[in-house]
Amino acid sequence: MAELTSKEQSKKWLQEAMSKNNISTLEELSNITGIDAGSISRYFNLERRPSIDVVAPLAKAFKVTPTEVLDALGAIQDPYEIN
């Protein structure tokens, strides 16, 4: 099975989401969400899977749905994707 989201795609999504919401640094995102900046970095580098309780604060900070965050983190697969 292929990787759902590449590290580069995930990092690009994070950078774009931060930019759209005028969030300059991971530390600033950390202050907004209450999630450790190092953990956020590991999530978007696909080095660690987030627990469910971090999805909502990230979605709220980026003004997106939780599904969009999960997709960016490579945690879900498009049900219509042909393998």
Image (tube, rainbow, N blue to C red):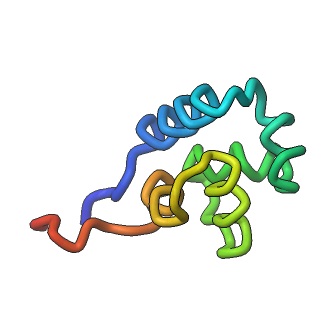
Q: Which residue is drawn at 34% across and 58% down?
A: 4
Q: Which of the 4 quarters of the picture holds residue 28? A: top right
Q: Which residue is drawn at 46% across and 57% down?
A: 68
Q: Which of the 4 quarters of the picture holds residue 53? A: bottom right
Along the line of sight, the residue nearer the viewer: 44 or 78? 78
Q: Which residue is drawn at 78% across and 41% down?
A: 29
Along the line of sight, the residue nearer the viewer: 2 or 66? 66
Along the line of sight, the residue nearer the viewer: 77 or 34? 34
Compared with 38, 17 (above or below) is above
Horizontal and vertical percent for residue 35?
A: 83, 55
Q: Which of the 4 quarters of the picture holds residue 19? A: top right
Q: Which residue is drawn at 32% across and 67% down?
A: 77
Would residue 10 be found to the left or right of residue 15 on screen?
left
Q: The C terminus is located in which quarter?
A: bottom left
Compared with 22, 75 (above or below) is below
Q: The N terminus is located in which quarter?
A: bottom left
Horizontal and vertical percent for residue 62?
A: 62, 46
Judged from this view, the residue extending furthest toward the front is 63
